[in-house]
Amino acid sequence: MNSIFTTITKRKLLNDLIENVQIEGQLDIISFLDKIWSLDSISSQDSRFNTARGDIWQHMINNNDFTLRYLYFEYFDLINSYDEIFIKFLETFIHPDVRFDLEDINKNVIRINKHLKGDNYEMAISEMISGYPVYKIRKIAQQLGTKSPKNIIFASNGLKPEIILTDTLDNEIEIVKNGEFCLIYDEQINDFQGLTWKTLIDWWKNKNQGLFDKDIDYERDLYKRLEDSLNENESEKFLFFNYFKVFKDILQEKLPALIPQVYLHYDPKTIKELSGVKRVSQQRIDFLLLLPNNIRIILEIDGKQHYTININSNEVSPKNYAEMVKEDRLLKLKGYEVYRFGGYEFMNSENPKFMIESFFSNLFIKYGLK
């Protein structure tokens, strides 16, 4: 029987769970097993009972003479079972119906993924239930957006930086000119926390400690530095200001950093130098959020230039619009979530502040932050 998982992976993973984890979590053993195999549909191996339910009760509860190793390796033969059964076992094991401690869930997802990655599979969040993540097995070979970011170049408030690759094998970069106009975050990002506002403040403090007055308010200083990168774009400033005003006290240490003006692609030459020809689309995005579990959110505020010939014209440009939606498709295929706001929403909405608050509230509910 062909399988997406090798027997080596199955055996090592199952051994790891048996030796280190209470597999049934908060459930009793019969309730847990019944979610996977439907015990009343399996014939008994003991002449005293009709179904597997009787076997499990007799040998796991009444007499307790089945070991967990015998139960999973021999009785249910999980190693040689169909992929659907093995996947159902893992997804049930990590489901919030079975375990509801978030730290325990995260540790066990790491434990499982350590074994599955050799077969190019992983457990990833598919939805949230009552604030708890529901994980499903997925293939990771083409999931380009699942790795932690290595460099975040952001908040440029002046000339475009000039970037070189100092090590092509390890994708090491260096800004050789105009680096003073942008910020670079190159610390390890915790996959299960994302990049929070608190973490970014701590990074800013470590980066600048000793350079400022000892009584400096590092949070306020960082906020002003990021706001400065928005230049004269009132819509971006409005979103940036209201995001922190509304959610900083609500989410506190869980608040994701709203990172402005992020270089997502890079071309060392300007459009002018390239005679108006783009080699890469939209090099810089308006805002980036890095949420827990490698969820990447891009926010764009679209002005007239996104759908007209230029910012001073009202003539519609199908070409500019097509380039924008093409870029959205590519970003989504790479694992990004892309949300666009029309600049018109900020100028003509009856209550743009409520519009922003409602969007982020629903976004955080979707991903279990609220």
Image (cartoon, rainbow, N blue to C red):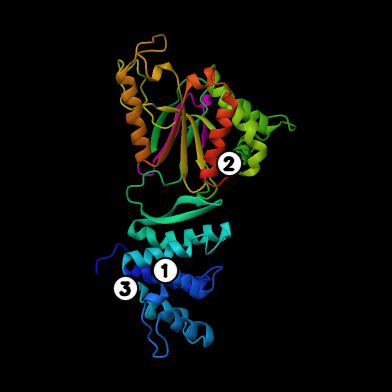
SS of the residue under disc 1: helix
Q: Which residues are magenta?
A: 169-186
At 58% across and 32% down in the image, what residue appears? 357
Q: Which residue is mark 3?
A: 80
Return the residue found at the far left. 1
Task: Please tell me in which quadrant of the rendered image residue 310 appears.
Answer: top left
Residue closer to the observer: 209 or 106: 106
Check disc 2 and report the residue beneath it.
Answer: 196
**Residue 244 higher or lower than 138, as above or below:** above
* Mark earlier in primary sequence (1, 3): 1
Name the residue located 69 percent from the left edge and 29 percent from the top edge: 212
Identify which residue, 178 or 227, lies in the foreground: 227
Amino acid bearing label 1: Ile
Q: Which mark is residue 36?
A: 1
Q: Decide: is 150 above or below 343.
A: below
Coordinates of residue 40 in the picture (x, y in percent): 41, 76
Q: Residue furthest bottom?
A: 47
Query: Is residue 213 at least partly visible in the picture?
Result: yes
Quadrant location, the N terminus: bottom left
Residue 114 in the magenta stretch? The answer is no
